[in-house]
Image (cartoon, rainbow, N blue to C red):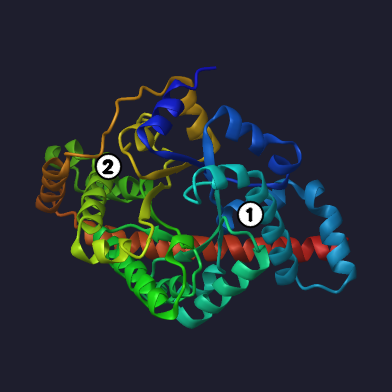
Amino acid sequence: MSTASLRDLTELGLSVWLDDLNRSRLTSGNLAELVKTRYVRGVTTNPAIFDKAIRAGSIDYAADISRLALAGASAEAVVRELTTSDVRAACDVLREVWMSSNGVDGRVSIEVDPRLARNASATSEQAQALWREVDRPNVLIKIPATREGLAAITDVTAQGISVNVTLIFSVERYKEVMAAYALGLERAIIAGVDLTKIHSVASFFVSRVDTETDRQLESIATPEALELRGRAAIANVRLAWHAYEDFVSSREWEALSVHGANVQRPLWASTGVKNPEYSDTRYVLDIAGSGCVNTMPEATLEAVNDHGQFRGDTLSGHFLEASEVFTALADCGVQISQVCEVLEEEGVASFIEAWENLLANVETAITQS
């Protein structure tokens, strides 16, 4: 099967990451194979991925659950052990990528308990605990980009912890995330922390923006509104990319880079296409550029591998076009700021639901072990 598009994306400077992890990928060698044959250079996880993994792979996890149950572990303790163990093993699989990229890639993400998303101090405390527990230099601790999460991002960055900031939907919040990271680096300098060891990505969610915007446009149902379906998400990413380029060319960033600071790379997340009318590769090939990350579900990865048509850099030089899309949306009555507020609330709620389902399923497994 062709890997030309994945190879071309990698050569462009985009990092291909896999948005999935389970025990069988590790024990079967599947993850290592994807690194070799699909140019995969990192892995992201979230509560929904772990819920699916442990439910679907009950045999893979049965021995550990039984062992921990006999030791009297709670459901939360079992989940913590299973998830950190998988992430630790994935970090080991990707260690060579991490070393060869000087720490830029070869990263594996694990998220703090999403129920803490509105509690900055508790988020920071658990991020530190996860960092210690996974105990791998190539782990990224995922922190939701809620308003409360911004303070936690600054706090843990200042302590030298590498962070994946997740659930970013709006360009405005993305700018706040970059500022929170920069402030953390400034505090790290004061604390004598080595900035060269700190890495970060900012996970900007893509497909959900089209899902919610299209819903509103179809409700409005005018010809002008219907013509805008499927255009909001890519425009949003391109405006975010413009904000990123502005930030890394600023005097503020120049002052940090003198101390060896690593840029916080934009990561395009939620890149699986939810509307079957759209191309299944659009949220990869239409937002490709040098210096960003795209984390893909396996179905999207394979679609790009199978029939993706690489077109080079599709991010740079689209600021005016993307701005015009947002103006047209506003003229139709769709406010992107409101769309993104809805999506943040739904995103946090969805991850909390997945986490609680995971706890409930593990509790059932404990009682049956």
Mark 1, secondary structure of its residue: helix
327 versus 349 height, above or below? above
- Quarter location, residue 310: top left
**Residue 313 versus residue 257: which sits nearer the camera?**
257
x 35%, y 56%: residue: 263
Mark sitting earlier along the chain (2/1): 1
The percent coordinates of residue 75 (x first, y second) are: 74, 69
The percent coordinates of residue 160 (x first, y second) are: 49, 70
x 50%, y 33%: residue: 301
**Residue 235 versus residue 34: which sits nearer the camera?**
34
For the C terminus, which image quadrant?
Answer: bottom right
The percent coordinates of residue 326 (x first, y second) are: 15, 49
Name the kind of residue labelled 1 in the image.
Phe
* Residue 181 marker: none
Structural crowding at the residue carrying mark 1, measured as other residues with C-alpha within 10 Å and reported as few (<14), some (14–19) or many (≥20): many
The percent coordinates of residue 201 (x first, y second) are: 42, 56
Lateral position of residue 251 relative to residue 18, left or right: left
Name the kind of residue labelled 2 in the image.
Ile
For the N terminus, which image quadrant?
Answer: top right
Question: In the rendered image, is residue 62 in sight?
Answer: yes
Lateral position of residue 282 relative to residue 68, left or right: left
Total marks placed: 2
x 31%, y 38%: residue: 289
Residue with the mark numbered 2: 234
Lateral position of residue 355 relative to residue 220, left or right: right
Mark 2, secondary structure of its residue: helix
Residue with the mark numbered 1: 50
* CA separation in Å, label 2 and label 1: 28 Å
**Residue 323 versus residue 1: which sits nearer the camera?**
1
Question: In the rendered image, is residue 119 in sight?
Answer: no
